[in-house]
Amino acid sequence: MKKIIIVDDSKFFCALIEKQIIDNTPFGVVTCNSLDEARIILSRIDKNTIHACLVSYRLRESNDGESVDLFRKHKVPTMVLISDITAKLRTHFWRLKIIDYFIKNDKHVAHEIVETIKRLDRNPNNKIVIVDDSKTSAKVLESLLQVHQYQLIHFTSPKDAFDYVKYHQDVKMVITDFHMPGMDGCELTRKLRRIYSKQELAILGVSGAGQSLMAATFLKHGADDFIIKQSFLAEEFYLRVNSYMDRLNTYQELATAASNDYLTGIPNRRHFFDVTDTMHDSMVRQNAAVTCAMIDIDKFKDVNDSYGHTVGDAVLREVAKILKKSVRKSDIVARFGGEEFCMYMTGMPAEHANMYFEKLRQKISETIIRAEDYTLQVTVSIGINSTLERDLGSMIEEADRRLYQAKESGRNRVITGRVAQSAN
Ligand SMILES: Nc1nc2c(ncn2[C@@H]2O[C@H](COP(=O)(O)OP(=O)(O)OP(=O)(O)O)[C@@H](O)[C@H]2O)c(=O)[nH]1
């Protein structure tokens, strides 16, 4: 487990922050109450296991800032604790390329520290594209963003940047200069906004000083914000980038929560229909092979009654995992509710469907599920329908009727409508 090192001479403060970090992040904590202790820890610990450190700028029996220098020398991402801030210190901190500073007696300090640690953990997955034909200007932004461990890609050509962002939906933010050959920053912003909404992509315009109209022009074309190259402060830049990134991450978490089942993490019924609606139309137009399947765990009530709901939940997660692992990227598996799942398989004709689902049924029945102190096995009944119909709802309804037949005729079996296969 990666760790956060806290260095502060107040044991009470260390304990308070340690608890917040342990309760709210995946990280462990090592605390030191003096610089000497911190030196010993640094000499013993494997540096790769340190996520970041939180260090008091002023410690008893050491010079101001000595603690920060020690961790910076060891290339540990550093957050600084301070009792109060001055303009001089602020400038000094950003020159040192620290992650952030926190005022110790601020009542939100623990929350802010935890949020910063979580953000630092997320940032390697947060992709930012910098578009600037000047490598020197881009380097300035890159070196600032690297401190916060964002994933960065630099393009000198706006056209190349556009092509990249268009096909890479994982880009969260574009920071673009205005004056560039071929396409200016506003045009790039306008083109990107046709594809991505503000909930999907943040765009920050950048330009030189003395361009008073530039901010309005960028915003008008769909940018979220604008910064002036020569004059922005590192602190202001971080606050803006981090707040847009936090907002995007929150939107995406909400979107995932709305479309995915909370227990198994696979799509829910609503999302299933959102996705399959257009997909199915195109399948019908191409007269392509499609198979729908309804899958239901047998006697699931007995699982809950015999082992408890926590074990029941673990069974649902395990079955969902097996279903998800068994499909291709173009197929969709969703939890329709309770112990019932639906699968939409593209390019699967009737002659393959029966064998495929028979294997799947067998795999589930052979899987040993471990939950709490129990080991158990469950079976599923499956109804499948490979007769292409314009209306997807009717196709699923028929698969559901066959699932009912599978239950009625003894469970743990697959019913295709044409042949009923007994597993027993
Ligand atoms: N643990 C857990 N149980 C759930 C969840 N959703 C539904 N259930 C339970 O699933 C059980 C479904 O029971 P039934 O509809 O009687 O079906 P069954 O026992 O599987 O019987 P057959 O389908 O006829 O084989 C009920 O006891 C529900 O309470 C869930 O999210 N977690």
Image: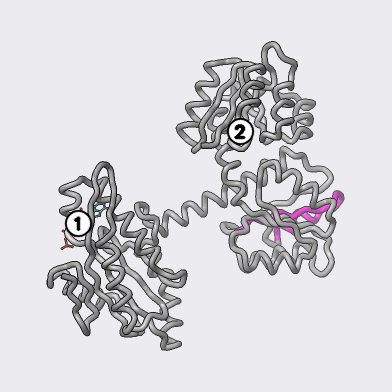
Q: What type is the residue that disc 1 sits on?
A: Phe
Q: Residue at x 54, y 34 (%)?
A: 114
In terms of image quadrants, where is residue 116? top right
Q: Position of residue 69 (x, y in %)?
A: 74, 26
Q: Nearer the viewer, residue 337 or 353?
A: 353
Relative to 101, does residue 357 appear above or below in the rendering? below
Q: What type is the residue that disc 2 sits on?
A: Asp
Asked if disc 1 is less than 8 Å from ligand 1, the answer is: yes
Disc 2 to disc 1, how far (Cα)?
A: 48 Å
Q: Position of residue 386 (x, y in %)?
A: 31, 82
With 241 as the anchor, is 364 left or right in this view?
A: left
Relative to 221, does residue 396 appear above or below in the rendering? below
Q: Where does ligand 1 appear, by image quarter?
A: bottom left
Q: Between tags 2 and 1, which lies in front? A: 2
Q: Residue at x 38, y 80 (%)?
A: 348
Magenta stretch: give its range: 201-220
For the C terminus, which image quadrant?
A: bottom left
Q: Residue at x 26, y 67 (%)?
A: 362
Q: Residue at x 27, y 68 (%)?
A: 361
**First reached walking from the N terminus: tag 2 or tag 1:** 2
Q: Nearer the viewer, residue 295 or 244?
A: 295
Disc 2 target residue: 46
Which secondary structure lies at badge 2?
loop
Q: Nearer the viewer, residue 386 or 284?
A: 386
In terms of image quadrants, where is residue 104? top right
